Image (cartoon, helix red, strand yellow):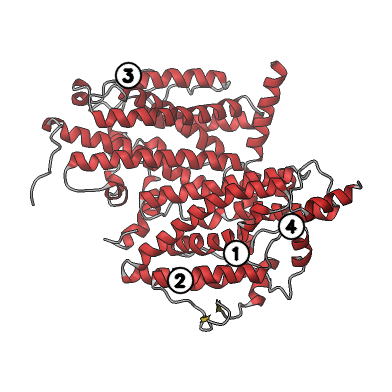
Amino acid sequence: MEAQDRFDAIIAADERIEADDWMPDDYRSTLIRQVAQHAHSEIIGMQPEGEWIPRAPSLRRKAILTAKVQDEAGHGLYLYGATETLGVERADLLDLLHSRKQKYSSIFNYPALTWADVGAIGWLVDGAAITNQVPLCRCSYGPYGRAMVRVCKEESFHQRQGFQIMLTLAEGTDEQKAMAQGALDRWWWPSIMMFGPPDTESVHNARNMAWGIKRYTNDELRQNFVDMTIPQAELLGLTMPDPDLRWNEERGHYDYGEPDWEEFMQMVRGEGEMPAQRIRVRKSAHDDGAWVREAAEAYAQKHEAAA
Amino acid sequence: MTGPDLLPSLQPSLQPSLLTHLLRQGDRALVLAQRLGQVITHAPELEEDMAIANISLDLIGQARHLYTYAGEVEGLGHDENHFAYWRSAEEFLNPQLVEQPNGDFAVTIVRQFFHDAYALHYWESMEASSDATLAALAARARKETAFHLRHSQGWVVRLGDGTDESHRRAQLAIDSLWRFTSDLASIPDETELHDSGVVPDSEVGERWRDTVVAALADATLDIPASTSTSTGTSTGAGTDMASSGWQGHHSSHLGPLLEELQALTRAHPGAEW
């Protein structure tokens, strides 16, 4: 059997492609792009929350947030590990991130202005991420699918802690309630844009579905997320910042308004101060750490040579 | 106002010195955890972000236990957050070493190493404490701290014996932090706690020095010629209490650190988070 036929048969049977299986170049490069973007998103995503670790308002919250940011670094590591099975090194991918030749999720270009934003990121951003990522556990590429199983377990814990922060604020003082509402107003539209452009505009949907990399379209995932989140917002007693939002009996889903896709495209293009800041922070950590990594390598070589 | 509600298991004459001891150790852990919390996302590699977050997390956990127990010993109904968020810099009793700024990775790691070597010997000795609560906490904290020391000491050796640049930076970090190590030699006013077996070992400082001397030799780094610190030549007897962090004397770095830690909480008195 030809290599291509074997690949097609595995995809048709909904089985897994493994690291040493033959795969078409486009399939490989699509996966590298997607998994790298995911890994980059994990480590850039450490920033808006990491900034709040020193300011967390109780020791319990400080511990939970520290653990969460630590998990994100861990997710970055597994995902860079998955890209290595596709033949690319973490160091090269980091260079592509730092030179802005590869992207990360543009959601992390929004600033976390108050403590409630930490809650909203957990509740909405991690909620949207889970909606996106649960189907990826069945991704046709084995190492990515398996990494996602572990990532999803931890993300659902993150989502719950974010909701907990929001609930505590929503039940708190008037100032805390206002803080929670402000964060919901800021994060709602960006989170529903995390699923990408509408299906009519999405470039990669059809091919990635055929390859078993993607299982649902952008709009299907977005609808799932909206349907899941509205009852949670009601439980919090907060007001959704979308006047068009209503239950549609006929469809059995919520109808929602049109996001500002122009803002989305600006964020994807990385225009403005926040994207520059995110890369600056990442790059300076990397550059300032160069002498440390060199020292570790020099030490290892010396002692390997001596052994 | 009624007086404190003393723990029945506690000898009343020991209450003030035990409370002070718990705050000293809790503050030591919290202030260092806070410094490490500022490093997360800025570490030289992802593995280090994870390790530093993990160490910070352990230290927050230790501080929470120490403060919770301090609240019980004090008997005024204060919880862990009271001690962390509602005391001012003059009331903090941590050694000055842990409040020093992060600097470059060499400073972060050397500070951590000096601290971990102290903390490991402290917790080892506390496993034999006559205070059951402290002895139980020590059993767990000792294990955590052994990992922290393995991590920080491993880096000190790699930096010292790595490249010329890493050696130079590590030596600079040692030279600049050395004067803050005098606090680690001993806490001279804890005689009552030693005598009663609550803090059984008064020789933690000597063991600290042995660990540091051996590791720095391994790292090809020098111990600074004894200058302003008493630790270089003696262990404790000469500690200058007028400048000791354990007595509430601090450098100018503690105030801003606490401001960042406490600002949000203090802006909303009485709020739950």
Of residues B99 and A285, the one drawn nearer to the viewer in this rendering: A285
Which label lies toward us, 3 or 1? 1
- Give how far apart the Cα atoms at labels 3 and 1 are: 54 Å
Instruction: Name the residue type under label 2.
Output: Pro
Q: Chain of mark 3?
A: B
Q: Toward which corner of the image does residue B184 lie, by quadrant?
A: top left
Does A104 appear above or below A238?
Answer: above
Q: Position of residue A224 (x, y in %)?
A: 58, 68
- Give how far apart the Cα atoms at labels 4 and 3 are: 65 Å
Q: Position of residue B211 (x, y in %)?
A: 45, 20
Label 2: which residue? A231
Marks 3 and 1 belong to one chain: no
Residue A107: image tag: 1
Q: Secondary structure at mark 1?
A: helix
Which residue is painted at 57% across and 63% down in the image? A128
- Give how far apart the Cα atoms at labels 2 and 4 are: 31 Å
